[in-house]
Amino acid sequence: MTGDDNLYSQFVGFLKITLPLGALALMSTVFLFARAPTQETTIPYAEIEEIAREPRLSGAQISGVADDGSVIGISAGTTRPNGDLMIVENLSATVDSVNGIHIDIRAGMGEIDTASRIARLTGLARVETSNGYEMETAGLTANLTTGQLISDGAIEAQAPFGSLTAGQMVIETPEGMDGQVMLFQNGVRLVYTPQQ
């Protein structure tokens, strides 16, 4: 019995030494591998002053129904008011027409005139339709009242039947018709690719 007590006392004595040493080793690794503070931990006072000077809205969304029945939705990463204009950045828009065609539009910048309900997209604008058209143009004007889209200049498009370039593109709903019509004009060049 005295041998068992001696073994137990030795085990407790061993733990009295190793457990504090283990805790010391763990604590030293916490401080050894700690990261140094970076420059990004400082508060960006210049950005706070800019936000206070220039009111803006992040993640704004506007939606409505045009006269032709198309549902139009616009969302922007950043929106700043400027009188009757809303200056928008990272703009994306969707148009769901009455005849079931879905149009996605993306542009880097633009402005929306709330009085006349006209949206002007500047810079590279990308347009994709659910019936297989992918287009790029330097700018796009959208009439939010009528649902009409007009490219500001030349347009390049990939269509289900091939590729085409044109001086201008117009998407609108003609009077007396149900659904939108896509019109390419001003020097249309079409490269037809037969489907196999």
Image (cartoon, rainbow, N blue to C red):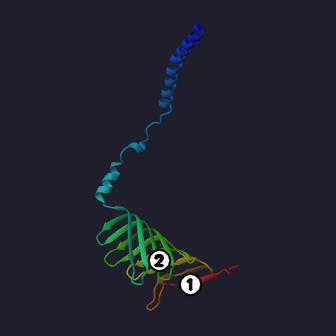
Q: Nearer the viewer, residue 157 or 77?
A: 77
Q: Secondary structure at mark 2?
A: strand
Q: Is residue 138 above or below residue 148?
A: above
Seen at 32% across and 74% down, the residue is 114
Vertical side of 121 occupied by 16: above or below: above
What amino acid is found at the position of numbered circle 1 in the picture? Answer: Val
Residue annotated with mark 2: 96
- Residue that appears at 37% across and 81% down: 145
What amino acid is found at the position of numbered circle 2 in the picture? Asp
Query: Whole-percent x and y of residue 179?
Result: 48, 85
Task: Give the total number of marks visible in the rendering.
Answer: 2
Outermost residue, right direction? Answer: 196
Disc 1/disc 2 C-alpha distance (Å): 26 Å
Measuring 44% from the left and 41% from the top, which residue is drawn there?
A: 38
How many other residues sit within 10 Å of disc 1, few (<14), some (14-19) or many (≥20)?
some
User: In this figure, which residue is indicated by the disc labeled 1?
Assistant: 188
Residue 126's spot in the image, x, y percent? 51, 71
Q: Say what secondary structure mark 1 lies in.
A: loop
Q: Nearer the observer, disc 1 or disc 2?
A: 2
Tell which circle, 1 or 2, labels the residue nearer the N-terminal end: 2
Tell me the quadrant of the picture where the C terminus can be found: bottom right
Front one among 91 and 175: 175
